[in-house]
Image (spheres, rainbow, N blue to C red):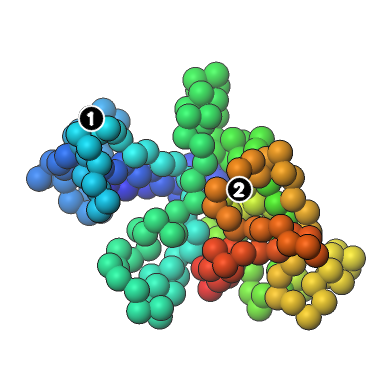
């Protein structure tokens, strides 16, 4: 079950998975209220979860690209869940967000993201500003996009925390590449479980998963 929530930053999603069942009265597009039952915790999964490990898979975050469904169909991939696909969701640590909300009940998602340190920054040459920043305009800073390369500051899993036009020096870093990694904070990157960036003998660069992530973001 995926819920969409209104927030000052824009549309925020929450996801509830591995459910044993969902109420038969629940329909796509339906409005729900706080406290309303949307599912029963279970152990359903394509890979199989032992009953002893039944749990709720919970996510909260932002939606990558409203054109994701078109990108997905162009790759001839299945199953087709439209824009509501795991590859199109960019979540944050839900336990930290909940803890911060308990400290400050008036906390909005924009303020939460503003307090998160970026794991890496990249400079990207693209023909247009990503749909992501049209839907979450408060995450874009400085001058309006004018066709020059852009800089994205991202969390470890690729959630853009900020975007802006690149400086002249940052543009030179690109050379003839479409994308270059400007900097990495290894303390924030941690174990680098998403493998969007990888270290090479010549420094950091986007890995295979990073190339796909950027393709979806800028599609």
Secondary structure under tag 2 reads loop
Q: Position of residue 59 (x, y in %)?
A: 41, 41
Q: Tell me where residue 206 sits by quadrant.
A: bottom right
Which residue is at a point 35% across and 44% down the rendered structure image?
15
Q: Is residue 68 left or right of residue 155?
A: left
Q: Tell me where residue 14 sits by quadrant.
A: top left
Q: Tell me where residue 23 sits by quadrant.
A: top left
Secondary structure under tag 1 reads helix
Q: What distance separates the C-alpha of mark 2 from that of mark 1?
A: 29 Å
Q: Is residue 41 visible?
A: no
Q: Is residue 94 visible?
A: yes
* Precedes in sequence: disc 2 or disc 1: 1
Residues packed near mark 2 inside 10 Å, few (<14), some (14 to 19) or many (20 plus): some
Q: Which residue is mark 2?
A: 192
Q: Is residue 169 left or right of residue 184?
A: right
Q: Is residue 208 left or right of residue 14?
A: right
Q: Position of residue 28 (x, y in %)?
A: 22, 54
Instruction: Find the residue positioned furthest to the front.
Output: 201
Residues packed near mark 1 inside 10 Å, few (<14), some (14 to 19) or many (20 plus): few
Instruction: Find the residue positioned furthest to the right.
Output: 169
- Relative to 70, does residue 41 appear above or below in the rendering? above
Q: Is residue 163 left or right of residue 58?
A: right
Instruction: Find the residue positioned furthest to the top.
Output: 103
Q: Position of residue 144 (x, y in %)?
A: 73, 65
Which residue is at a point 66% across and 58% down the rendered structure image?
198
Q: Position of residue 131 (x, y in %)?
A: 55, 65
In the rendering, which numbered label is found on residue 52? Answer: 1
In the rendering, which numbered label is found on residue 173? Answer: none
Which residue is at a point 68% across and 40% down the rendered structure image?
188
Which residue is at a point 74% across and 67% down the rendered structure image?
180
């Amino acid at each position: 079950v995926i819920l969409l929530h209104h927030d000052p930053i824009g549309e925020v999603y929450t996801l509830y998975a591995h459910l044993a069942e969902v109420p038969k009265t629940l329909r796509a597009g339906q409005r729900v209220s706080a406290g309303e039952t949307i599912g029963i915790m279970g152990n359903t999964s394509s890979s199989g979860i032992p009953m002893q490990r039944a749990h709720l898979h919970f996510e909260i975050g932002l939606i990558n690209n409203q054109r994701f469904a078109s990108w997905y169909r162009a790759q001839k991939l299945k199953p087709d869940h439209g824009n509501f696909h795991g590859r199109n969701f960019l979540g944050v640590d839900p336990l930290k967000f909940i803890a911060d909300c308990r400290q400050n009940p008036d906390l909005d998602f924009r303020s939460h993201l503003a307090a998160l340190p970026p794991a890496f920054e990249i400079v990207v040459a693209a023909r247009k500003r990503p749909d992501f920043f049209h839907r979450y305009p408060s995450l874009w800073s400085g001058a309006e996009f004018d066709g020059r390369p852009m800089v994205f500051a991202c969390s470890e899993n690729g959630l853009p925390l900020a975007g802006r036009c690149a400086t002249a020096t940052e543009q030179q870093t690109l050379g003839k590449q479409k994308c270059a990694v400007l900097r990495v904070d290894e303390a924030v990157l941690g174990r680098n479980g998403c493998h969007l960036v990888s270290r090479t003998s010549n420094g950091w660069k986007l890995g295979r998963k990073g190339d796909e992530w950027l393709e979806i973001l800028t599609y």
